[in-house]
Structure formats: C-alpha cells, structure tokens
Image (tube, rainbow, N blue to C red):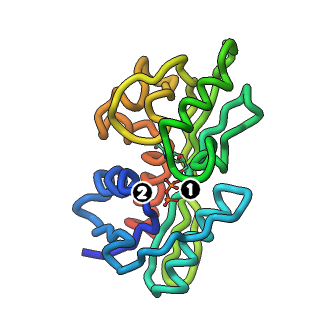
Amino acid sequence: MQELVFATNNAHKIEEIRRIVDGRFRILSLNDIGCHEDIPETSSTLEGNARQKARFVKEHYGFDCFADDTGLMVDALGGAPGVYSARYAGPGHDSKANMALLLKNLEGISARSARFVTEICLILDGKEHIFEGRVDGEILTSAQGEAGFGYDPVFRPYESDRSFALMSPDEKNAISHRGRATAKLLAFLLNP
Ligand code: ITT
C-alpha cells in the first residue's frame, strides 16, 4: 500500500484522516518518521502555513507528504481567530482557554455565524497541490459535547442541530472542513 506522511503534531487530525483514507493509503505520522521537531508556522495565511509544514518535511526528511492548516473564522470578530486559532488565548494549544475566550468575546452578540476552513498542501513527485474544505455554522453560547477536539464543542454546522463534539467521528467527517478537503485529496490521489 502506498505510504504518505501527514505532517502534523495533532493526533486527532491523523485519526480523522486515517478513517477517510483507510485501506487505500497508509498514513505515517511525524513520529513514525522520527520527526520530533516543532515545525514552524509563520505565514499569515492557512495556505501558506500548510505549504510551510509540508515543505519542511519534504526538505528535511525527504518524504512525499501533506500538511493541514485549519482556522475558525468568526464573522462578528472580523474573521478572528482565523489563522491564529491555535494560539487565540496565548501561546500553546489550550483548547479550553481558546474556547473560553471565544465565548467571552461573543457575549451578548446574537450574530454568531462562523466557518471552519482547512487548507491541505500535498507534495507529490516534486509538485505542490492545494485542497480546500470549509463548513459554515455558528458559535454556540456554551460548550456542548466531549468528542472531537479543539473548538468542536462550541461549533454547530448549519447542516446539523448538534455541535461537532456531539457527533460520531464519521458524522463529523461527512460534513466537516477537514473531511471535505480530504475527500478532494483522496480523489486526486486515486486519479491524479
Ligand atoms: P498541526 O499544525 O501540527 O497540524 P495544530 O493543532 O496546530 O496541528 P492547526 O494550526 O491547523 O493545527 O489548528 C488551529 C486550531 O484550530 C487549533 O487550536 C485546533 O485545535 C483547532 N482545530 C483544527 N481543526 C479543528 C477541528 O476539526 N475541530 C475543532 N477545532 C479544530
């Protein structure tokens, strides 16, 4: 089976993508290739960060690979946290603190539309390919559910009456930003 490195430090992302491509591609983690570095993400765009992460792995480890950069854009906050979603409440990846700050900043605001956007950069045979997925929805007034990761408890896609954190992995993948971007990636890989 063809192997592809997924250039992420986020185990939840790997789990989600493995469910989608399972049986067709073997997804290797950074751990699997002995990469334990913090890959720089210094671009001001999701696409730029996805390219940066994929290039880092290709240049330093030599593998064909892909990377995902994701952001949550909230209209009432002018598109924040956006590309800075991971560090919204400060350095690090503290999802609880990020969600708490988001809910605080939206207190008293009834227009709560938002979207998740994922940009995937694939590097294959020396060429870069970009795949985008997005889902529109709203920010809830409190966290709901335990499944998923990141901002999942406070985001409800319009296509459902539940937050992502109240869905099974397959339900989330069927309509999520990452699920949609990965479906495009998979279609390309199967029929380049
Ligand atoms: P890598 O850069 O190593 O891939 P990361 O967790 O830093 O992992 P991102 O920069 O893409 O990934 O994520 C930005 C933020 O958005 C971060 O706080 C995530 O927890 C959150 N996030 C990403 N995908 C999400 C999803 O499907 N559901 C909820 N939150 C998500």
- Judging depth in this view, the residue of 160 and 9 nearest the camera is 9
- Judging depth in this view, the residue of 95 and 64 nearest the camera is 95
Q: Where residue 38 sits in the image (x, y, percent)?
A: 52, 70
Q: Quadrant of residue 147?
A: top left
Identified at 35% across, 50% down, the residue is: 16
Q: Where residue 134 sits in the image (x, y, percent)?
A: 56, 41
Residue type at numbered disc 1: Asp
Give the residue number, with chain letter if any, for mark 1. 69
Identified at 45% across, 63% down, the residue is: 8
Mark 2 to mark 1 CA distance (whole Å): 11 Å
Q: Is residue 167 above or below residue 129?
A: above
Identified at 53% across, 37% down, the residue is: 97
Label 2 residue SS? loop
CB under 8 Å between discs 2 and 1? no
Q: Quadrant of the N terminus?
A: bottom left
Q: Quadrant of residue 153?
A: top left
Among the two numbered marks 2 and 1 on one chain, the one whose residue lies closer to the N terminus: 2
Q: Where residue 24 sits in the image (x, y, percent)?
A: 27, 64
The label on residue 10 is: 2
Q: Give the residue at the far right of this rendering.
A: 78
